[in-house]
């Protein structure tokens, strides 16, 4: 028994992101139910908020607003109508083909639902329903996987948040927020961690391509998704939050296949005894030796982050910038303190500060006052205007002894910061050297956003900019090691 014996496994997996039709099984008319939010998000992209929620929803239905371009079929045993769509009592009642299903029914009904999907010829199912391996209900989880395999159905989940494809667009989640378009594809074993990444990404102009909350990984694993992401030309970097590996060897092999052409950043949680215990109660994760994880990541070319913000900081650097051809990094700043902090952190990370040549120093002498630092970090002094800052940056991009540049801007009364941000982008577009920036202390702002929108990662604090550059340097090391760069 199979939903379609002629469809390859990779095509089944890619179908999660490019379905032509979707059934929402367990769709609900109650706005407080997950089955309502999933259906509404698929239809409209995201749902409105506020006291006039119902009025806005009715207006969206009336106007025929639509985000996902394919067909959507609500399924609920009660029948009726939800959000202007006819509700089918079972998936078998749907007269047309169903490419993908999102399952939101109680756990005791999931197995029978999968049987019906198999009979319908649907081979991709997102099981949002919880109540399986994460609470020790391993037998029930095993049963739904065995049933799915009888029919050739692939499952994401159970106990997951859903799937995004920002370019279709497709929001098959119960999220309140949608990510902006961008080059980073994300895998998260925790739905809440993934949702937080989306919220943070919106505030920092970090764009995502694909997003999967993978939950218990009863069937579809990180390795499966790595191979899908690796085939996608719009994915320029992969970020992973992981607590356990159902098959560590398979993950390692998939990462090796992908990492030579798409950078991978991973945050492996549960590396301490306290973390392992927490992971076990969260998703039923089985502890993995952290020594083994560390070794496997290095051999597979995965950049390992140790914090949530480190995961996102590294991913956005790798997603938007290319690695330097060497390891000599220069710092440009109008604030000596920020430069010193960054230099210290670079030392802690094992990074190299570029030694400025006499020729470069002479060129900077022509645009800066005698009080500039005459070394790296290049401190153009606190009274610098945007012209002095920009001209110095141009000189640094042309210096052969510099492989990458960290730009640290402390907004002062002498700087036209929006103008400077535009000059930075212009200069960055004229060089092959990677560049990251920090408008120090600015969480979000016009200039900060302008850089992000034009492919230059901009961080709130200098250490985080240094970490982004560190990810790029490590990427360069790996590519040179395997002979790709």
Image (spheres, rainbow, N blue to C red):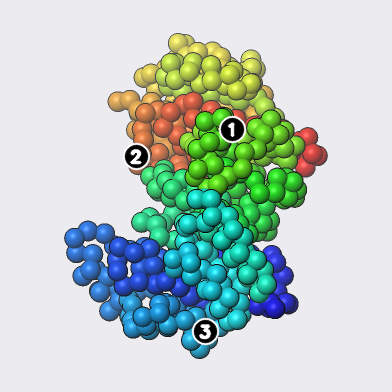
The first of marks 3 and 2 along the sequence is: 3
- Which residue is the extreme one toward the right? 483
Identify the secondary structure beneath mark 1.
loop
- Please give the residue where the numbered disc 3 appears in the rendered image: 92
**Pointer 2 and pointer 1: residues touching (CB < 8 Å)?**
no
Q: Report whether 274 appears left or right of 198.
A: right
Q: Which residue is mark 2?
A: 445
* Observer-nearest of 379 and 240: 240
Q: Considering only order in the chain, which callout, 3 or 1, is on the residue closer to the N terminus? A: 3
Q: Please tell me in which quadrant of the rendered image residue 418 appears.
A: top left
Label drawn at residue 61: none
Task: Give the tally of numbered discs.
Answer: 3
Quadrant occupied by the N terminus = bottom right
At 65% from the left edge and 46% from the top edge, which residue is drawn? 245
Vertical arrangement, residue 463 with respect to residue 157, above or below: above
Residue 71, percent from left and from top: 47, 79
The image shows residue 271, relative to residue 127, as above or below, that is above
Res. 12 in view: no
Residue located 58% across and 19% down the image: 348
Give the Cα distance between marks 1 and 3.
45 Å
Q: Are marks 3 and 2 in contact (CB under 8 Å)?
A: no
Mark toward the start of the polypeptide (2 vs 1):
1
* Residue 271 marker: 1
Vertical order, 370 against 351 (above or below): above
Task: For the C terminus, give its image quadrant.
Answer: top right
Viewer-closest of 315 and 131: 131
Secondary-structure class at tag 3? helix
């Amino acid at each position: 028994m199979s939903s379609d014996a002629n469809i390859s496994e990779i095509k089944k997996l890619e179908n999660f992101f490019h379905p032509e039709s979707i059934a929402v099984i367990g769709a609900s008319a109650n706005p407080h139910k997950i089955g309502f939010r999933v259906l509404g998000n698929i239809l409209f992209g995201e749902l409105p908020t506020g006291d006039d929620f119902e009025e806005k929803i009715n207006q969206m239905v009336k106007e025929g607003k639509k985000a996902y371009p394919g067909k959507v079929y609500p399924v609920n045993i009660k029948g009726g109508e939800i959000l202007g769509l006819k509700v089918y009592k079972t998936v078998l009642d749907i007269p047309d083909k169903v490419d993908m299903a999102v399952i939101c029914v109680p756990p005791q009904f999931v197995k029978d639902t999968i049987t019906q999907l198999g009979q319908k010829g649907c081979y991709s199912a997102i099981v949002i329903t919880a109540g399986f391996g994460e609470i020790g209900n391993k037998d029930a989880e095993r049963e739904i996987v065995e049933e799915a395999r009888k029919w050739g159905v692939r499952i994401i989940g159970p106990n997951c948040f859903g799937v995004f494809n920002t370019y279709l667009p497709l929001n098959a989640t119960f999220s309140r927020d949608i990510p902006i378009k961008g080059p980073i594809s994300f895998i998260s074993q925790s739905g809440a961690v993934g949702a937080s990444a989306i919220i943070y990404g919106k505030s920092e102009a970090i764009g995502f391509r694909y997003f999967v909350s993978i939950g218990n990984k009863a069937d579809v694993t990180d390795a499966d998704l790595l191979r899908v992401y690796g085939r996608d030309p719009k994915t320029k970097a992969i970020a992973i939050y992981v607590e356990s590996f159902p098959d560590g060897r398979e993950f390692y092999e998939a990462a090796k296949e992908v990492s030579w052409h798409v950078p991978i950043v991973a945050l492996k949680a549960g590396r301490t005894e306290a973390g392992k215990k927490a992971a076990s109660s969260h998703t039923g994760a089985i502890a993995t030796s952290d020594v083994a994880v560390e070794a496997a990541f290095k051999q597979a070319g995965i950049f390992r982050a140790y914090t949530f913000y480190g995961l996102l900081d590294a991913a956005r650097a790798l997603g938007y910038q290319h690695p330097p051809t060497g390891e000599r990094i220069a710092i440009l700043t109008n604030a000596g303190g920020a430069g010193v902090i960054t230099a210290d952190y670079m030392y802690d990370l094992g990074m190299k500060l570029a030694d400025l040549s006499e020729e470069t120093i002479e060129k900077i002498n022509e645009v800066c006052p005698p009080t500039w630092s005459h070394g790296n970090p290049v401190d153009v002094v606190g009274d610098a205007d945007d012209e002095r800052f920009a001209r110095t940056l141009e000189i640094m991009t042309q210096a052969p002894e510099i492989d990458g540049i960290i730009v640290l801007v402390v907004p002062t009364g002498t700087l036209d910061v929006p103008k400077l941000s535009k000059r930075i982008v212009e200069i960055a577009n004229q060089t092959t050297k990677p560049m990251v920036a920090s408008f120090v202390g600015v969480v979000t702002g016009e200039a900060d956003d302008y850089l992000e929108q034009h492919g230059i990662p901009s961080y709130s604090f200098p250490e985080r900019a240094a970490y982004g550059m560190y990810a790029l340097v490590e990427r360069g090391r790996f590519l040179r090691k395997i002979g790709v760069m």
